[in-house]
Amino acid sequence: MASKIREALLSSLTAHKDEFVSGQELAYEASCTRTAIWKHIEELRRDGFTIESRRKKGYRLVGRSDLVTENDILLGLETEQLGRNIVFYQTLDSTQKIAHQLAQESAPEGTLVIAEEQKTGRGRMSRQWYSPPGTGIWMSLLLRPELPPQKAPQFTLITSVAIVQAIEEVCGLQVQIKWPNDLLIDGKKITGILTELQADSERIYSLIIGMGMNVNQKQADFPEELHEIATSLALAKGEPVSRAKLVQRVLFHIERYYKMYMDKGFEPIKLLWESYAVTIGKHITARTLHDSISGVALGITDEGVLLLEDKDGVVHPIYSADIEWL
Amino acid sequence: MASKIREALLSSLTAHKDEFVSGQELAYEASCTRTAIWKHIEELRRDGFTIESRRKKGYRLVGRSDLVTENDILLGLETEQLGRNIVFYQTLDSTQKIAHQLAQESAPEGTLVIAEEQKTGRGRMSRQWYSPPGTGIWMSLLLRPELPPQKAPQFTLITSVAIVQAIEEVCGLQVQIKWPNDLLIDGKKITGILTELQADSERIYSLIIGMGMNVNQKQADFPEELHEIATSLALAKGEPVSRAKLVQRVLFHIERYYKMYMDKGFEPIKLLWESYAVTIGKHITARTLHDSISGVALGITDEGVLLLEDKDGVVHPIYSADIEWL
């Protein structure tokens, strides 16, 4: 109930941006008392919104700091289901871990776990993901698609395409995809995706899509060993980026591609993905757990598997590897 | 340590079946004191072993009742890794649930959870699996194959083939496989398999293979509504079957086929599976969650997906369905 009021309140304030709105009108639009409005305004201020108030005139939304609390994300979120249930933490071990727990406690599809800081954020192969406070987007999205487990890896690709679109929209930056799960700007890592699942042989119980996005880090915010391999959107763009806005557009595009996928299958996503992929058509080396194969990356299969043609013309399906190219 | 002594003790007693073995010899072979031997003999008796003891002659293994405790399974187990770590419960909710917990607590590959009775045993699609005490085999096996999640459904088929072999060996009965996960004798259900996984897009973290086998039930042990659709090995064979022996052979054959699969790929397993499958080449109806497709079952793909050719010659990949045929 309280979150409904907050949402209505934020949407009224935004609709009248730069104008004062009376407490009475806000109360009417949120179907609550003026006392409740007053209480929620105080709460929003604590969450980083700057709201001016004047006697007899009412309230005016001036702006907000770059936060990713439930309020920041809900205000302006254009999805139907994704991100409608948000679990925000100032700091936690890992958003993946919490999302898995919520999945087992029957949390609804679209539940988003997001944190200002992760203590033990992780990426592929249990590798550490550097997630310092206040600068990036560290979040995990719970989906429950009615699909067999073979289809799960496609969701890393769906998410990649959605994030490329969101970054282009919000920052005007061109992003490239490196199979299987990295997004790059000028060859440096800007986003990593980790799709995990719980399933039986026939159907997925829950799919947890973890996303780590470097947004407002300055060069000095990265540890020395990451300088050559990671960058942030703010560094690439030359100015700060609204994290909440980016989360909203990422969720919007994931929802859109997810629906497209369920309606029309993987083909349209696959074509989009291949158009952004940096490795397709190139001579690459794929280092797997036990092996290393070199050849030309032909494309991906309908299940998100990379196809690599070696010098003898043999095509190898690559399920998991680190990719290198010149 | 204690379980090492027990294992050595059981193997000495079995090696000298029908003969007396002195406490001193047993102590020597198990590298422990005679007092430890005496203590372990008492424990084995409590676990259902009949062990005769005579002054100056020692101990003689006469036999054992049909139990599936750790001891019963270890005595005569011919695997290298599967079932070498056994967690036995007299009664529990579901062996799957415990196995998932153990998987997250880093239990080793091959860990087996087995119970005399399950209160809330379940099969595919969260359907109930009737698991009364003392008559069947209710167990879950933990594997950690270095494979991508797309391969997980193959393990239901590997397990099916292993169980068919084990039943043929121990009971001399012919079993048929009904895609995806049922084993039948005379059209009635004898075994169900539920393969569950935790994974990311690239690799399986843990694979839990749940097996429910109807072994020594009498007709009256089945509830009325199951009379037409389920039967037991004892009913089919006309005499009781050793559950421990069956568990041993099931584990042995799963290990064998698992190795074969990792060495040579899915092809040999697939051929075996198709030779036992009752539906291949037949006209069947596949009822999926939202749909129903009729046609001829052509076979399975390399990922365990059923291929169904409808009357217009269109081939449908079936990932999940209930199969019916005339």
Image (cartoon, coloured by chain):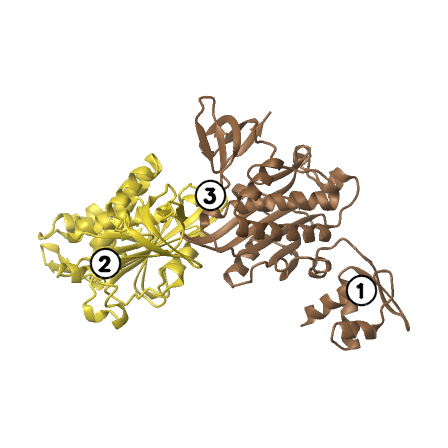
Chain colours: A yellow, B brown
Tell if the residue under mark 3 belongs to the same chain as the one under mark 2: yes
x then y, percent, for residue A314: 40, 45
Crowding near pointer 2: few (<14 within 10 Å), some, many (20+)? Answer: some
Q: Which residue is mark 2?
A: A187
Q: Nearer the viewer, residue B235 or A20?
A: B235
Q: Disc 2 to disc 1, how far (Cα)? A: 67 Å
Tell me the chain of label 2: A
Cβ atoms under marks 2 and 1 closer than 8 Å: no
Q: What is the number of the mark on residue A203?
A: 3
From what the image shows, is residue A87 above or below residue A259?
below
Residue found at the far front of this picture: A312
Residue drawn at point x = 16 percent, y = 54 percent: A171
In the rendered structure, the answer to whether residue A34 lies left or right of residue A57 reads: right
Residue B51 location, quadrant: bottom right
Label of residue B13 in the image:
1
Left or right for A106, reference A68: right
Residue at position x 53%, y 42% in the image = B267
Tell me if I can see residue B42 in this picture: yes
Corner quadrant of residue A90: bottom left
Q: Earlier in the sequence, mark 3 or mark 2?
A: 2
Describe residue A171's horizontal placement relative to residue A127 as left or right. left
Mark 1, chain letter?
B
Q: Position of residue A238 (x, y in %)?
A: 12, 61
Residue type at tag 1: Leu
